Amino acid sequence: MPGLAELVTQLLNGVVLGLLYALIALGFMLILGTMELINFSHGVLFALGGYLALSLQPYVGWWGALALAPLGVGVLGLLLEFGVRRTYGKDPLFGLLFTFGAALALEEVIRIIWGPRGYTISAPAFVAGRFELGFLVYSKYRILVATLAILLLAFVWGFLEKTPYGAIIKAGAHDSEMVRALGINLGRMRNLVFALGTAMAGVAGVIAAPMWSLKPTVGAEAVMPAFIVVVIGGIGSFWGAVIGGLLLGTVSGLSNLVVPRGSILVMYLLMTVILLWRPRGLMGQKSALEL
Amino acid sequence: MRRFLERWTPPPMLGMFALFLGLPVVLPLLGYTYLGTEIMIWAIFALGYNLLLGYTGLPAFGHGAFFGVGGYLLGMSQKWWTGGLALPLLIGVVGTMLCAAVVGLFVVRKRGIYFALLTIAFGVMFWFMVFVLDTWTGGEDGLTGINRLSVLGFALRDNIPFYYFVYAFFVVSTIALWRIVSSPFGQVIRAIKQSETRARALGYDTPRYKWVVFTLTGAFAGLAGGLASLARFGAFAEPMSLHQSGNVVLMCLIGGGFASFYGPVLGVAVFLVLREVFSTLTDHWMLLYGLLFMGVILFMPEGILGLIQRVRRPTTFHDTRAAQAASGEGIPAAPPAPEQSGPR
């Protein structure tokens, strides 16, 4: 039977992981909800964020890299959108396949620039080491990750709910024709959303890198949970992504105690159960995407 | 007799069969007998998959998983359970079909990107399962030591007899699929692609039709996967991975699976030949590959055969896209083959 300290540690790990999943999933879902596009390159952009930070860090420091790397990824997303926009209004498959091609190409670009080997990234110096709280010892870096993730989630929530841009984005996802009729430049808005969503992937990549270490395929491993989070939470719901992420994180953290190698399958079990119970996900609304 | 041939094997199909029948005369000279076999195996997979993509219009994205499952089931039953060749192949096909049937239950009520998202998630689940159950599947190393054995006294170890072994399955599968798409059932799934709402309004239980199609594609994926594991003397996980699950979709698309029944075969051939060419040119063939796909989507989304069709017969006014826009469908899932509803 695992001890209490171990249980709490895994629970905390789960929450940190869950916040990170929520962050990745939210960037992914922003694009999914607004453009009805599955951005397959989300994972590789996540990885790219980590790699860019790795290269920038010696020059601009950790905080500098945290700001610049996502910016770089966002600009790349902006460029990518110019290709993606040709697929709007067609079969959703085309956008998916376009970003799939982009993911293959970008992963190879990572291999060309940084080589196929993996990198272990050490946490920045000011959060190296551990907290000691009585019976509990916990990594300081993970606490920083959790704080940053919460701040970023709050920022996105504020952007979507409290600014006119957020209102336009949500309205555009609901009825793009009406938004256009109101004289709003939907094309530019979509461009912006794509950049924002990809920048969020980049940010998640930067802060996750010291926890997961970097290799060219890390992106694929990062987006899979994000897919599950979106399915669990329901497409188009901010709180669905947050709750889904936390649920998934804690479940996989706790299952690490019981079935260490099967924690991924436990995630799928969770997804299946939730789909059986609520076919649209926890917070999903009825949409045009189903019967 | 003539009508019989028309119905079962129309002239283009006979031509294709004849081409593949004669191919082993040429291929060994170039040192590519195995490539011919691989093309037929993937063609079985892609032709089956196109039932879902091109005919029903459902963008499933996790079918690489079923390809893999077929191979593993064949391998495991040959090594530890039934032994032999025929029975493991049957187990591979039926077992994969059952997997697809179960996944199908979850996905058939969705459409568009939600459908794609769910199929991706379930596809990756099978991929993970291979690594979690590595005592049975061999995990990273793959399940090696699968034996081709022999059929009717021909040892399949040699590539030429094995080529014709696969050829037989290729012919039977193609004819079976042709009969499916030419049947009333094929009409209904094409109707679902045009407008699921309308098909429902006509009284068709569309989720059930979609489920049957999904299950059928599982069977063909299992067959192809089983044959692939025989071809490579082992079952491996990489066709199931997130990165390769898109291959079959691209194969269908490049060849023109939306425009023609034969599109997927052409697509498979182009895809695999290009892979050979690229990988001899450079180590970074994935980069070329990715850029190629992006280019195909941007400039030639209807595929090779679709492009030929468009050039030969320019778009008429009464195309389905216009009809769909007029019907006020929720998602503009316009079929890229403008002059008809589904592939012929």
Image (cartoon, helix red, strand yellow):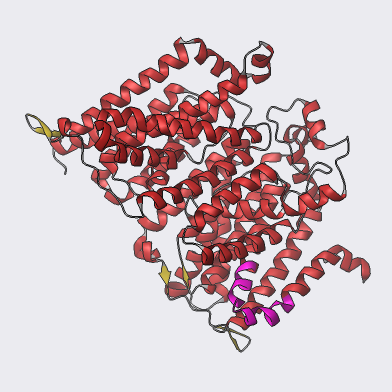
Between A11 and A74, the one nearer to me in the picture? A74
Looking at the image, which residue sits at the far right? B2
Query: Does residue B112 lie above or below B136 as drawn?
Result: above
Q: How many marks?
A: 0
Q: Which residues are magenta?
A: B21-39
- Identity of the residue drawn at 92% across and 72% down: B1
- Identity of the residue drawn at 46% across and 61% down: B283
Query: Does residue B285 lie above or below B122 as drawn?
Result: below
Query: Does residue A85 lie above or below A187 as drawn?
Result: below
User: Relative to B66, is B9 on the left or the right?
Assistant: right
- Measuring from the top left, give residue B50's x and y in whole percent: 68, 53
- Measuring from the top left, give residue B185's x and y in whole percent: 77, 50
Judge whether residue B341 is colored magenta: no
Between B220 and B344, the one nearer to me in the picture? B344
User: Relative to B132, is B33 on the left or the right?
Assistant: right
Image quadrant occupied by the C terminus of chain A: top right
Query: Does residue B131 lie above or below A103 as drawn?
Result: below
Quarter of the image where one finds residue A6: top left
Does residue A250 show up? no
Does residue A158 show up? yes
- Identity of the residue drawn at 69% across and 44% down: B299
- Measuring from the top left, give residue B211's x and y in whole percent: 64, 46
**Which secondary structure type mostly characterizes the magenta part of the structure?**
helix
Looking at the image, which residue sits at the far bottom? B153
Between B21 and B310, the one nearer to me in the picture? B310
- Measuring from the top left, give residue B115's x and y in whole percent: 59, 39
- Identity of the residue drawn at 34% across and 32% down: A20
Looking at the image, which residue sits at the far left? A134
User: Relative to A58, is A99 on the left or the right?
Assistant: right
Image quadrant occupied by the N terminus of chain A: top left
Quarter of the image where one finds residue A50: top left
